[in-house]
Image: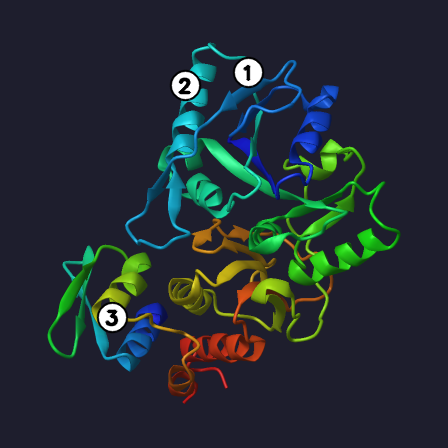
Amino acid sequence: MFRAALLDRVLGHFGLSLHDWAGSVYVLRDRKGASAVVQDIGAVWSEAERLLGRPLDPLDAALVAELSR
Amino acid sequence: MKTPVVLVTGFLGSGKTTLISRLLERPDMGETAVIVNELGEIGIDHHLLRRVDERTVLLASGCVCCVLRGDLVDELRDLLDRRDAGEVPHFGRVVIETTGVADPTPIVMTLLSDPVVRNHYELESVVATVDGVHGLNGPESVKQVAVADRLVITKADIAATGGCANLEEQLARLNPTAHTRAATFGEVEPDWLFDGATRDPRDLDLVPGPGHRELDHDVRSCVLFLDEVDWTAFGLWLTMLLQARGQDLLRVKGFLNVGGDGPVLVNCVQHAVHPPVHLDGWPDEDRRSRLVFIGCDLDAERLRASLSAFDRAARPGRS
C-alpha cells in the first residue's frame, strides 16, 4: 500500500499517474491523455521515461522538496 | 545447486592469463571449465577450455550497458547440456576470462538476466587484475576495477618500491568494496578468489571517508552511512536512480538496515542488479546502512537527501 502511495506521489510530481488495469497490468497516463501499458512495476520507470521524453531523476531538487513536505 | 562463475577481467597485459594459468595448476582447482575469447597460453591440463566469439545482443531498453553476450549464453547452455549428457568432463566451477579492453558489464548482465543461465549458474565474483607497473590504464581499466569484487595487483616483484602501496590506495579510493592483493607471477591463494561456499557476504570493510573521493577519468566513489531505511522506498528509489543514471553509475554496493535481524546486501553493476541477499546477522556492532556508489557526476549529499526523502515519504507516521 505504501509503495503504491509513494509511486503515485513520485509519478504525480512529473505529471503522470498509474492505474491498475484488471489487476494484472498497469496503465501509465500523462496529463495530455497519452498512455503506456506497464507489464510490471519494474518497468514503470522506463515506460514513464518514454512517455515523458526524459528520465525521471530521483535527485531532482523539486521532487526531493515535494517528498520532504 | 548452481555452478559458481568467476569472471576474470583486466586490461591488456595486466596478467589475467598468468593468474588463471597458475590457479589452474593447483590440484584443488580441478573440475574447472574455462571460457576465453582468445586461445592463449592458459594451462588446460585436466580442465575444460572453450573459446567464444563475442556476440552481443542489445536489450529492448536500448541502453549501451544493457547488452547480453549471446555467445556466452549459448556456451553456458551448451556446457550444461554436455555435462548432463556426460559428453564433457564434470565441472563444478566456470572461469570466464574477458578480453583486455572488454567492458565486463554485459557479461554480468548476461549472468543475471538470461533465465536458463541464471537458474543454473551463479556469479560468485568479479576479479580484476591491475598492472602493478603501469597502474590503471584508461577508462576501460577504471571500469573493470569499479565492477570488481577482488583486485589483484600483478607484477609486484618489478613494481617500483612504494608503487604497489600507492596503487593499492588509489584502487581503494576507486572501489572501497573490493579486496586487494598484490601478486607475483599470478601467485594468489585459490581460496581468496574462489571461496563462494565459505565467504561471508558481510565481508565489507567500509569506513567513513571524505564525501567524495576524486579520481582520474571523471570517476569517483562515495560512501553513504544511513540509519534504518524502508525497503520498499529504497527499492523504488534505486530502480528509479538506475533508470535515470545507470550509464553513469558504475556500481552500487553495500548493506541496508531494513529493520530485520540482519542487513540486506545490495549489489548493482550499472543496470544489472544482483538479487538482494537478506543476511541473518550483522558483521559488527554498527547497525547503520552503508552504501558505496562509484560513477561519474556523483554528489553524496544529493544522494543522501533524495534517499532520505523517499524513506520519509514511505513512512508518513514517522517524525
Q: Position of residue B296 (x, y in %)?
A: 53, 67
Mark 1, Cα crowd under 10 Å, few <14 / some 14-19 / many 20+, is some
Q: How is the image coloured?
A: rainbow
Tag 2's secondary structure?
helix
Task: Please tell me if label 3 and label 1 are on a single chain.
Answer: no
Mark 2 touching mark 1, by CB under 8 A?
no
Tag 3's secondary structure?
loop
Q: Quadrant of residue B100?
A: top right
Q: Mark 2 belongs to which amino acid?
A: Asp
* Residue tagged 1: B90
Residue A11 visible: yes
Q: Position of residue B12 (x, y in %)?
A: 62, 40
* Residue tagged 3: A53
* B217 lies left or right of A26: right
* Residue tagged 2: B81
* B143 lies left or right of B233: right
**Direction right: furthest residue:** B161
Mark 3 touching mark 1, by CB under 8 A?
no
For the residue pair B126 and B58, the one nearer the viewer reads as: B58
